[in-house]
Every structure is written in C-alpha cells, then in structure tokens.
Image: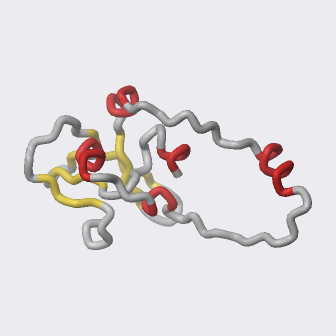
C-alpha cells in the first residue's frame, strides 16, 4: 500500500490515531480503519445517497449506458494533507496515514 501511494509512514505526532482493522474477505485481506472516535467528530456532508427508484426515474428515456468499475473506489479520492493526518493508524511496526479516502470512515460513501 505504501508503494501504491495509498498510505504513507508517519514519524511526527498527530491529533488522531485509529486502530488498524483487518477484514478477511474471500479473496484477500483488507486493511481498514477502526475510527469510531473520528467518525463521531467528522462533519458529514448533507448528500443523501439516491435510492434505486430515484435513479431509475432519472434514467427514463436514456439510450446509452456504460459500466464503470468502482473497485477500490474510495481510493480514487485523494485526501488533502491535513485530512490525511486525521487517518493516522497504528500497526505493530509503526504508524501510517492514508493518502486517499480509506474504508471505515462513515462519510466515505457520500464523498465517493
């Protein structure tokens, strides 16, 4: 993840440090944040995710469609430096921060 510019080492002290959570999915292990206190402090955007019914209504009369691969979609959204330090997490070896939107933040689906 460091080589892919998803996370970066943190040497200095930070205001927030979350736990690392490892999710064992069928194909591979996935590293996420366990940011319960951070999630309580985040001001979420007021953007309700549209329902399937609302989307179907908007698609009436459309003739051209495409499929987008949103695999690791959150990782397509870079964080500014200040926000990046809020995603600092500890591992048994050192601390890291996400450079992109991590899985585990309660605002991630709305931002994506």
Q: Nearer the viewer, residue 39 or 66?
A: 66
Q: Position of residue 17 (x, y in %)?
A: 22, 39
Drawn side of residue 50 relative to residue 45, left or right: right
**In the figure, 108 relative to 76: above or below?**
above
Q: Residue at x 65, y 42 (%)?
A: 49
Q: Nearer the viewer, residue 16 or 44?
A: 44
**In the figure, 67 relative to 33: above or below?**
below
Q: Residue at x 51, y 66 (%)?
A: 27
Q: Quadrant of residue 99?
A: bottom left
Q: Residue at x 21, y 46 (%)?
A: 90
Q: Position of residue 87 (x, y in %)?
A: 29, 45
**In the figure, 90 relative to 4: above or below?**
above
Q: Position of residue 11 (x, y in %)?
A: 9, 52
- The extreme left residue here reads 12
Q: Position of residue 78 (x, y in %)?
A: 37, 58
- The extreme right residue here reads 61
Q: Nearer the viewer, residue 6 or 33?
A: 6
Q: Residue at x 50, y 36 (%)?
A: 45
Quadrant where the N terminus is found in the figure:
bottom left
**In the figure, 93 relative to 3: above or below?**
above
Drawn side of residue 26 relative to residue 62, left or right: left
Picture colour scheme: secondary structure
Q: How many marks?
A: 0
Q: Quadrant of residue 77?
A: bottom left
């Amino acid at each position: 993840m460091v080589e892919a510019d998803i996370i970066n080492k943190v040497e200095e002290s930070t205001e927030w440090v979350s736990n690392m959570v490892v999710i064992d999915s069928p194909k591979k292990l996935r590293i996420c944040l366990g940011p319960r206190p951070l999630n309580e402090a985040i001001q979420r955007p007021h953007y309700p995710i549209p329902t399937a019914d609302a989307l179907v209504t908007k698609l009436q009369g459309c003739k051209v469609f495409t499929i987008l691969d949103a695999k690791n979609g959150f990782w397509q959204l870079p964080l500014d430096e200040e926000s990046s330090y809020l995603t600092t997490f500890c591992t048994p070896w050192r601390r890291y921060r996400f450079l992109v939107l991590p899985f585990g933040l309660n605002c991630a689906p709305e931002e994506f």
